Image (tube, grey):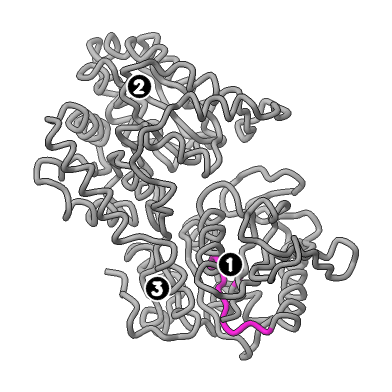
Amino acid sequence: MRVLIFHGYLLHGTGSNVYNAELGAALVRGGHELHLLCQERDPFSLDWVDAVGDWDAGALQVRERGAGPVRATVYRPNIGGVLPLYVADRYEGFDARPFPQLSDEELDFYIESNVAAVREVVERARPEVALANHLVMAPLIFARALGEDVPYAVKVHGSDLEYVVKPYPRFRPHAVEGAAPAKAFLVGSYHTGQTLWDELDDPTVPPRTKLGPPGVDVERFAPRAVDLQDLRNRLAAMAPAAVTGSSFDRDTQEAVAALDAVEPGDRLIVFVGKLIASKGVELLLAAFPLVLAREPRARLLVVGFGAFRPGLEAMAASLAAGVVPEVQGEDGRELPQVSAFLASADETYAEAAKATAGRVQFAGRLDHDELTGLLPACEAMAVTSTFPEAFGMVAAEAAACGALPVVANHSGLGEVARTLRAAVPVEARDWLSFELGDSSVTELADALSGWLGAPEDVRARTREAIVETTRARYSWDGVARTVIAAGQGALADLPDPV
């Protein structure tokens, strides 16, 4: 089948970028012909890409990798350099800004440029089914470019809803226009489905909404003995990037330093994600002294980037100095869960926090492929978001490696925890999640400490259960089949979000 996908971003990194790269590979494995529009600058870095097209010379030009059959072509529309985002980030070569910061003229240009590109690709490729990523602006682009010729589904990743459509009514008409012709909406959780229904306020949308979480590459993310020295050497061999002092920089040398700090016998806890206030990393930093008091071999590795990193580093430094800090998000927002805990912290806690000195490392940005060399060496991953998440992909990847994910019990994260909870031994069920509230820090610490201190037979049975469940429930080949069925409107056999 000829499949068309619109994804307005890259094919490396995290979140929806990884989703589309893995989905593309799965579609090619399944024998389909793929035509994908995105802003990836080096598509040939992905081995499943056979041809690359762009409009840099003013007209579409397509270059093939070799003489073999062309199964997947990646096209990069010329959008003039302004790349609209859901959450602030930096993309080399782009003027990357959150959607709300764009003028009407800039937004119109972005939409019109992509509509023209999609029309030309459709004329060239004659796709039979399509997928629009994010509620804005891909569905609107498809609605204007495809007409009734090509049926399409919409993958709602979550950030599109929570950070743009929901708080900024300006973008609701764009979402409504793009949603109207869609055959289906794929969501990672019931929470995202409910938010979608509330925002669109269209009685025809809930029956078209089906469960479609991301997948996990269970061949690469798997339990195995890994030597962190291998990852360390791989990163050390990379040419140092230009460092501007921004919290968005990727500096592989700081990842090397973080890995060099790991000692034999350390028990690694990891966080992977954006370093922004909504990700709740401050809860983990506050909980870590309590964990370390019970397991002195624990070590915390923070992987990620974002505007809150300076504040998080300052918090970690204060705790290591035995000073109970006051913490606010990068935008000055209040952080009620950690504030409730720190307000009641006494001298005993402050003294215990000194033990965190040298045991909390910030590794900066790691690419998705690099996580395969890290997660199998970790014993636990904390996924601490205080803001709704469509799905906990990093939690599922950790579970696939045998590292226990400890997640905030809400939205898509809570649904991952419930799936795993049904499979693990009774003794381990409470360690999979914690509630958001005044007791978040202590609950998180109890879960991590309970897991690290559990009898080995319980730990072995738990690891086996989370690995097997992840392999059975999440696979990219299954995601590819779901996407095609949703795009065709064949919804009867697709699960409802519950």
Badge count: 3
Mark 2 is surrounded, within 10 Å at the Cα level, by few (under 14), some (14 to 19) or many (20 or more) other residues, namely: many
Residue 372 against residue 233 in the figure, above or below: below
383 relative to 25 in the view: left or right = left
Q: Which residue is identified by label 2? A: 299
Report the Cα–Cα distance between label 2 and label 1.
40 Å
Residue 422 against residue 433 in the figure, above or below: below
Q: Does 300 lie within the magenta span? A: no
Find residue 202 and report its image quarter: bottom left
Q: Earlier in the sequence, mark 2 or mark 1?
A: 1
Q: Earlier in the sequence, mark 3 or mark 1?
A: 1
Residue 212 image position (x, y, % from top left): 40, 68
The kind of residue tagged 3 is Trp
Extent of the magenta region = 126-138
Residue 10 image position (x, y, % from top left): 64, 54
Report the Cα–Cα distance between label 2 and label 3.
42 Å
Residue 408 against residue 201 in the figure, above or below: above
Q: Which residue is identified by label 1? A: 136
- Mark toward the viewer: 2 or 3: 2
Q: Secondary structure at mark 1?
A: loop
On-image quarter of the N terminus: bottom right
